Amino acid sequence: MNVLELDALAVDLLVEGRLRRVIHEVTLNVAESQAVGLVGESGAGKSMTSRAVMRLLPAGAVIHGDIRFWGRSVLAMATGQLRAFRLRDAAMIFQDPRAHINPVRTIGDFLTEALLERGESRHRADAIVSGLLSAVGITDAARRMRQYPHELSGGLLQRVMIAAALAIGPKLLLADEPTTALDVTTQSDVMVNLDTQRSGRRPPTRARAGDAIHHARPRARGGGLRPDR
Amino acid sequence: MTLGLVGNRLVSFAVTLFVASVVIYGALYLAPGDPATLLAGGHATPSVIASIARQEHLNQPFVVRYWDWLAGVLHGNLGESFLYRQPVASLIGGRVLNTVFLVVYASILIIVGGVALGLLAALRRRTGVAITVGTSIGLATPSFVAAIILITIFAVNLKWFPVFGAGTGFADRLWHLTLPAIALALSWLAYTAQLTRAAVHEELGKEHVETAHSRGIKQRRVVSRHVVRNAMIPITTVSGLTVAGLIAGDVVVEQAFGINGLGSFLVQSALDKDFASVQAVALILVTAFVVVNVIVDLWSLVLDPRLRARAA
Amino acid sequence: MSATAAPVLAPPPAAGARRGRRRSTLLRDPVAVAAGLFILGLVAVAVLAPWIAPYSPSAGSILSGNEGISSAHWLGTDSFGRDLLSRLIFGARLSLLGPALIIAISTLVGATLAIAAAWIGGWPDQVVSRVADILFAFPGLIFAMIAVSMFGAGLIAPVIALSISYTPYLMRVVRAAAIQQRALPYVSACYVEGLPAWKICLRHLLPNVAPILLVQATLSFGYALVDLAAISYLGLGVQPPAAEWGLMVSEGQSSILAGHPQESLAAGVMIILTVVAFNLLGDRLASRQGMELA
């Protein structure tokens, strides 16, 4: 069984009162320990595909086809099941970390939030997170965790984002252009990081970014993603 | 770092207060007619006016007189009302409690009611529309109109609350001052509700909220940890304006409900041209306003760590 | 032979054309139209009062005091037996005139100060801003009360005091817009061309700042109306036997206890409706503004 299956996935978004198709029938499988990259022009629908998997599409969106995680349909999940899916099984790394991390809470708060939600003790959550920060190359974890997002550079924030996503030990990792906001050196650092995580811990990764793509094996089949006109 | 910031705020607070006090004191000299006559309250004989002139050292230069007045105020001497032949301080003593009670009561209603309504309006679509209509009307209702509507319905017809007065003791005051507090709070409650709704609505659309959702955090916790806290920031900055409105509204509400407070005293003194009293009460009210503003300012520094960095 | 002329940037489209386009889209908004019509109707009623009102606002005898709704008196009478409907109609005159004066004065003074401060910059700008900050510390009502204690009750003292008190609000909004405009290249181009500063301000800055000014003025009108009515309610403004809505609320208050709330309620409702209309219109104008700036 595949970790993730997109079966003739099509997505319509509500734009100015009308439905517009932004993803045209994508069929795609991701097997265990596999990394899949989606390549496309800006506007082709890469972000939307990831968001569809996490069911984070904007209000009014209509999804056709199916998305299956280990055989279970993600689209058919009830609220509780969806929450469990997001809490334990899948994680997403967003582009633009500065916008995606709450500016008035500390980094430590951000990192441990999902773990605490799962019922871990504060002590254990802190320990897990400190370990992860070191794993993504952030030294002096204790100090960093007390800091606020505006005190960290974009590159550091992106690594924090990655650490946060890995914290719950996801079986599926979705990364939306995780290195676009970073400079070239940091980019390769981050991608190496992700790769190490993948081969070391075996979560199948789906990495998508134009430059980072050489780390993954592109495997989009079927209808594919057509750039929007 | 933070100390410099706080110091900054305190300095501008002191400056504003200083200038305001000069304006309040100086207004006496801008008025038509000679200051001694004005201080006498317009009901005085020439000999009284002359003795006032001597007593107040009106032959001294303005700066000296202002300084005397200010020094007196800082020592608790708020001047003497020539109308009542008593120090102003003793005239307002008992009234301060009523005013403070009323204003605090109204503030609690505004903050609790306003934020709650605003949150409700932002999170639930259908109730939201009703709340928006209600708050638009509430915003347009002056406190004295709210007062008479409340009196008509709840005091005269339903007889649930007394019509006049402030009562004595805590529980009695609570009962007497409920309708006045609602009248005072109404338009500001509506304003706060609209502001909260807008701020929460905007915050809900932000990316960091999307992140929280993507991690499977319960909606209730997303709202309390990420939405409300962030939305409070713009609301806090508006609180300063609210206070000015509350002070002004308090004057009207006290008159409407026959409450013996600072506000009604101010009105009476203005009508009687009891200038010393007007000066003293105006100064107290403006000081209260500035103090609350400084507190609100410092509170927003607590709420938003980015401001601390930016201002340092 | 003409010397090489520096490329001249065209100033933004003439204010007239922009205004026309905006007006046509505003007319399609039902809320704005309703509010606008209400306001226009109110102004018409105020102007035509002597011809519309069934009775004179001061005519009445105590014998017919506090009557309810009847065919002779559509809204009943007040405690002095005067027809309420007529008093409301005549009351519109003073209730609308006061705020109009306040807004007119504060807009004129505020806009002038703001544009001048934005243009000149430097320390005059700083001084003006500081003064405005301090004025913000004075609630308008307190200012008005100080003025009344100095100059006596009536319409004049409160109107002047409130005008001073409202000026910083208009000034702040205009100054921000003016500074933004001032920084645009076309202004420097006009300056280089040799246009005198005051002409640039008048012909170019002002029309571009006017829309924002209009929004702020509309919204402030409601607040001014409430403030002035409150002052009359307190007895510090319009004096009896004149008809004014705030004054009517206060005059009718003693009758409420006797079971005749009509005077206070009628006047109060008029105030609420008028302020709602101005707020709605101002909001709609503002969102249109936002759309154009976006």
Image (cartoon, coloured by chain):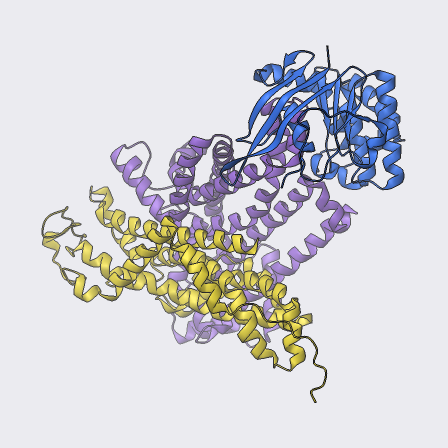
Chain colours: A blue, B purple, C yellow
**A210 left or right of C136 in image:** right
* Residue A102 visible from this viewpoint: no
Foreground residue, B116 or C13? C13
Which residue is found at the position 54% from the left and 75% from the top? C202
Q: Nearer the viewer, residue B212 or A207?
A: A207
Q: Position of residue C163 (x, y in %)?
A: 45, 66
In the rendered image, the vertical position of residue C278 relative to residue B132, given as above or below: below
Among the 4 quarters of the image, the one containing residue C23: bottom left
In the rendered view, does B109 fall on the left or right side of B72? left
Check the image and report above or below for B89 versus B157: below
Q: Position of residue B29 (x, y in %)?
A: 51, 73
- Inspect this view and state whether residue C111 appears: yes
Q: Residue at x 33, y 42 (%)?
A: B164
Tell me residue C43's x, y (percent).
29, 62
Residue under the point 40% across and 54% down? C281
- Image quadrant of residue A195? top right
Viewer-proximal residue, B48 or A206?
A206
